[in-house]
Amino acid sequence: MNQHVDLLHGPVLKSLTKLAIPIMATFLIQMAYNLTDMIWIGRVGSDAVAAVGAAGMYMWLSSGLGTLAKTGGQVLVGHALGAGHNEEASEFSENAFGLTIIFGIILGIICAVFSAPLIAFFKLNSAHVIADAEIYVQITGGLIIFSFLNQTFTGIFTSMGNSRSAFLATTTGLVINIVLDPVLIFGIGPFPRLMVMGAAIATIAAQAVVTLMFLYYASKDTLIFKGLHICRIPDVRHTAAIIKIGFPTSVQSIVFTGISMIIARLIAGYGDAAVAVQKVGSQIESISWMTADGFAAAVNSFIAQNYGAGNRERIKKGYCAAMLVVLLWGLVCTFLLMVCPVPIFRIFITEKAILPLGVDYLFILGVSQLFMSVEITTAGAFSGFGRTIPPSVIGIIFTAMRIPMSLVLTRTSLGLNGVWWSITISSICKGVFLLVWFLVYLKKEMCYTDKVLLCNKEGV
């Protein structure tokens, strides 16, 4: 059975949706790894949640570097496949994996050796919270290479129009994580009670299994993985092309996380409970942005292949169809977070003193869900063209605004809620400005295509 979706022919919405649904499901499953940890860790207490939340910031920061190889590889493989250059697509894939392995090893060593100073940045108040956070960084950061490889595999398979393999691999990992979490956290049967350490071990074990499954699917592929050696040292030409496209997105991700860490440090000033609220709230909110991110990945591959094939009109139709879907999704998420914050937050933390803080977080962030979905999908569309600088510029500028806005708003009667409003306001700005920029860019692209077709017709 052919698992590759034909992105160059046939009904646009059908092709896009067929590719997008497994990707969105994959992203939601990846999010479920963290949610599963939060549900079980939340039963241990808010201190454990704060520890995982602080440590998780570095996993988020590290993933920005993994994004470089994943984004550059996905876009260039898509362009090559669209142009019918399968051998070149294979070469780009090989070099993307080479970069991934190098980055994974370097960051793994840093996290394992320097966990104490990394966690000290947040100035957490409790000694046992700090100790748990250090352990979590050492385990999940030290073996982050599995996460990096899974990112790159997902990107390459998606660019091929095969999102089903990523879905199956990630689903298997989730099942393993769901089984191992309570066993290792609470010590069921012969297993010791490991708590935060158990959550970290369960996550890494699941990620390792996902990597093995990706290797299996790659061994069965005949399109670009046949004869490909993922451990080969990257060559200069292909690596430079990957870095050129992936670097802006990587910088944006790292800067975004760095700013989030500064804000997390500001939040820590309100106590470990506030850190726990931010961690749990962001995980709940991730249902919205990871679904949009999944659809954006589909849009990326759709546009990349059609750009390589020169199908400009199909690109326009694909973007319009994608925007219709994410707008509806954004509205649904806004409704849920603003209307049902209490039962949603209570799933993760049941402590009565913390619940009002969590409700405020979800309600305020609910205001921006529609705009955030627009921003993420449009960023994916830009990346499909190989233009990763515009979303990075918009993302960095308005994300950086969160720091001064937070400092100003927290000094008003809003208090901690001022931080949440700074995030919402910046998300609204990013969605609006990036959409306008893309529409202008798309119009220029269409005009350029029309001129080229006219010249060819007239024999110029």
Image (cartoon, grey):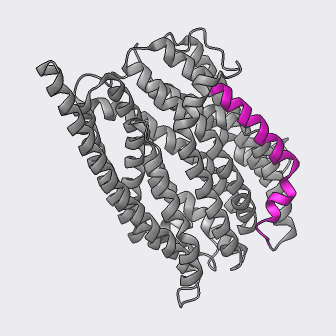
Left or right: where does residue 448 sit relative to residue 124?
left
- Classified by dominant secondary structure, the portion drawn in magenta counts as helix
Left or right: where does residue 29 sit relative to residue 196?
left
**Who's the residue at 67% across and 30% down the image?**
99
Q: What is the x, y in percent for residue 404?
A: 57, 76
The magenta-colored residue range is 97-124
Residue 132 image-quadrant placement: bottom right
Give the vertical position of 442 relative to 351 (above or below).
above
Q: Nearer the viewer, residue 286 or 58?
A: 58
Residue 275 image-quadrant placement: bottom right
**Who's the residue at 83% across and 72% down the image?**
126
Give the vertical position of 213 relative to 41 (above or below).
above
Give the vertical position of 178 relative to 337 (above or below).
above
Q: Nearer the viewer, residue 324 or 49?
A: 324
Q: Is residue 242 visible?
A: yes
Q: What is the x, y in percent for residue 64?
A: 62, 46
Q: What is the x, y in percent for residue 39?
A: 63, 56
Q: Nearer the viewer, residue 381 or 220?
A: 381
Q: Quadrant of the N terminus?
A: top left
Q: Is residue 370 visible?
A: no
Query: How many numbered marks, from 0 up?
Result: 0
Q: Quadrant of the C terminus?
A: top left
